[in-house]
Image (cartoon, rainbow, N blue to C red):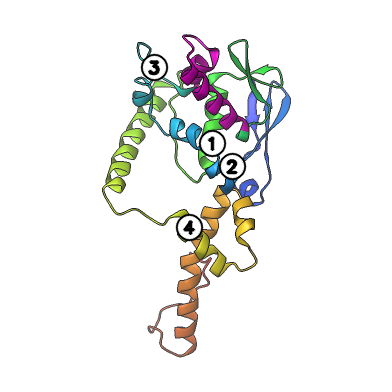
Amino acid sequence: MVNFNTDFSELKLLSSQKISGWIEGIEFEIVPPRLLDYYNPSFTFLLSMLEKEEEDIKKIIVGREFDSHYLLFSFILAGINKTEDVDKIGLLILTGLQIIIPDLVFENKQFKIKGKFLNERAFNEIVLILFKALDRKKIIINKDDDPLIKREKEMKLKAQKIRRNARNNEATGNSIEDMLVSILYEFQQYSLEDLFELNIYTIYYLFGYVGKIANYEVSKIAFGTGNYKRGKKHKYFVEK
């Protein structure tokens, strides 16, 4: 069992700090992706792969079935049955991962960080941190999970898939461009260049307050002019 842990917290994301990880006592950095990274081909390709569920990645390599991204990526990077297209895919995957884990390499058919072997469970933990940094939910079933935990995760995955399909059938939500304009309007201390340098979690966090601030300003005016429903309390926008 590889000794692996991190100091991840949502507060670190908001403060734009890098996350520290330790593997066998050796420290390394996990870098939350910036909005600018959304426009990096390696990162967008990596994300498109990681968004696929296990049942989908089994079909990617003809004649082979992999039940985890870790095994699929390892196979591609190991260069077995290598072609020019597979080589390009492997390069996109590795450079995409290195945006988040700069010290990550693939050598001797293994993922390593500063010479230490990165096993599948530790890899999955980093993927979960990545999705949290993107303000997205990700469920990964580890091979050594307790049977009850596996069953619970399987049920959550099914529910998540149903919700995703329902959203896909509805109108699309706010675009990145809409979010940026809204943030620039409400938080005028930022420039457009500043926003592209922020991590993606912070962008979603700020956008989450745009509507609340707008509603608060309307409520404040209504309260000040006496046009407020009797008995209703005027709350600050961060109050629950």
Q: Which mark is residue 177?
A: 4
Element under disc 3 = loop
- Residue 191, quarter of picture: bottom right
Label 2 Cα crowd, 10 Å radius (few <14 / some 14-19 / many 20+): many
Q: Which residues are magenta?
A: 70-98
C-alpha separation, residue under disc 1 versus residue under disc 3? 21 Å
- The reply to whether dot 2 and dot 1 touch (C-beta < 8 Å) is yes
Mark nearer the N terminus (4 vs 3): 3
| Residue drawn 31% across the image and 34% down it | 158
x then y, percent, for residue 141: 43, 26
Asked whether residue 2 is in view, the answer is: no
Q: Which mark is residue 33?
A: 2
| Residue drawn 60% across the image and 60% down it | 192
x then y, percent, for residue 19: 66, 39
C-alpha separation, residue under disc 2 versus residue under disc 3? 28 Å
Given this view, does label 2 or label 3 mark the residue nearer the observer? Answer: 3
Q: Which mark is residue 61?
A: 3
Element under disc 1 = helix
